[in-house]
Amino acid sequence: MTTFVDRVVLHLQAGDGGHGCVSVRREKFKPLGGPDGGNGGHGGSITLVVDPQQHTLLDFHFHPHIKAANGGGGAGANRDGANGKDLVLKVPDGTVVHTQDGEVLADLIGAGTSFDVARGGRGGRGNASLANTRRKVPGFAELGEPGDQLDVVLELKSVADVGLVGFPSAGKSSLISVLSAAKPKIADYPFTTLVPNLGVVQAGDQTYTIADVPGLIPGAATGKGLGMQFLRHIERTSVLVHVLDSAAPEIERDPLADLDAIEAELAAYGGLEDRPRLVVLNKIDISDGRDLAEMVRPDLEARGYPVFEVSAVTREGLKELTYALATAVAEHRLARPAPEPTRAIVRPRAVDEQGFTVEQDAEGVFVVKGARVERWIQQTNFDNDEAVGYLADRLERLGVESELAKKGAQPGDPVRIGEREFDWQPTAGEYVTGPRGTDARLEDASGRATAAQRLAARKARRVRSDDELLHMAPDGTISSVANAQRPVLVTDSDDEDDTDE
């Protein structure tokens, strides 16, 4: 027998984006080939799709940890990384997706309805995509953006037109087995039904679905019994049917008291007050069952309930009940507003919207929040000075530095963006081309010479060496510095030979 699962907690991890590549084209006779680092691939996303063939969340119960593929890293020769494969998870019709805090993210009804629950990370750009007029050969690339990581709760609420409620052993399973092709477990002891049952009923040209839940008992709203945890499966129903046991005197129960107890539990659950109700007096084939049904029927009709006397064994009264339910369901369908086609919602950003906020917390740290700036932080390699300088330029153009100044931030104050905290220093001037991977504006103040300074020093020493190697004698004769260290004898210009002693 297949296990029924209608609530699971999923631990989702979308794929991370691949890192961009830092590469410079090196080819014979083409020394200025330029950057050719490719972009990283996007990480795989996770999507939930309604599949009519799925009726339970059992698969997710045994495999709650789901991870999509990561994007591939970029490579030289302008080769982009492969995108991670998206995951499509099939869920039953009527699945509700919400956070563990209870916030509803999506209500999936109808075959083919989908919801992107976890988005894959964007791939980082390679240095070929980052090149511009100032950075013609960038010495850095963007890192891949991490994919979404979250825990969500899936709850299955069956999409049925008619819901059967009642005490244990009231005959709900027997009733649904003769009204439809459903084959629930039927036995002569309470709590036979442990999971909701769903069946399809044909009444003339009308077709509707019917569902029953495990029996309710007084105190179910406080956790007693099994039925209350399954009442979510009748939340979407059009009509509620109270199934009362006409053989209740045999077990020392009163049908009217049973009705009042069930209504009290439904009121405690909430959200079902507006559903039309019908009452079914079941088991009239049992001795004294018909007499009790005729006795309580006037009281039920006085309360405004349509009453039907039926027997699941002899099938007496089932035809009238079937068509009455079809009429009630049709009236409910006509009363509902016509479904509107899904419209694309466009939310343009306001002209004066900055896309970020700056606030100072209790510890004096200036916290910058915003999807764009936090993504930039995630994609920056902080071991590369040029990448850090590029990030500073982007933040300055976005207006983050001016906003920090307005909030009273001073150079050296702590600033936090995402998970990265640093001491704020305003951007000093524009980027000046230097060796790849460096930024002159971020030179270490410890006194250690930068690569550019070391290169300049080598050039200066080379010039001095050339000057010292050549020494001009007073009469115009050129001699080496090495020879100048020893006595030099310079003869007259008329002599043909020069002699060194």
Image (cartoon, helix red, strand yellow):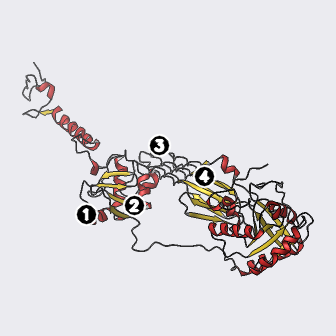
In the depicted structure, whether residue 169 falls above or below residue 490: below
Q: CA distance from mark 2 to mark 1?
A: 17 Å
Q: Amino acid at mark 2?
A: Lys
> Based on the displayed image, in which of its 4 quarters is residue 394 positioned?
bottom left
Badge 4 crowding class, 10 Å Cα cut-off, few under 14, some 14 to 19, many 20 or more, is some
In the depicted structure, whether residue 117 falls above or below residue 33: below
Residue 148 at what x, y percent from top left? 53, 54
Residue 49 at what x, y percent from top left? 67, 60
Which residue is identified by label 3?
Answer: 27
The tag earlier along the polypeptide, 4 or 1, is: 4
Q: Amino acid at mark 1?
A: Gly
Badge 3 crowding class, 10 Å Cα cut-off, few under 14, some 14 to 19, many 20 or more, is few
Q: Are marks 2 and 4 in contact (CB under 8 Å)?
A: no
The tag earlier along the polypeptide, 1 or 3, is: 3
Which residue is identified by label 4?
Answer: 10
Q: Amino acid at mark 4?
A: Leu
Residue at (32%, 55%) from the top-left corner?
A: 415
The tag earlier along the polypeptide, 2 or 3, is: 3
Q: Are marks 2 and 3 in contact (CB under 8 Å)?
A: no
Q: Are marks 2 and 1 in contact (CB under 8 Å)?
A: no
The answer to whether residue 364 shows anywhere in this view is yes
> Based on the displayed image, in which of its 4 quarters is residue 315 positioned?
bottom right
Which residue is identified by label 1?
Answer: 408
Q: CA distance from mark 2 to mark 3?
A: 45 Å
- Secondary structure, mark 1, is loop
Q: CA distance from mark 4 to mark 1?
A: 44 Å
Which residue is identified by label 2?
Answer: 369
The tag earlier along the polypeptide, 2 or 4, is: 4
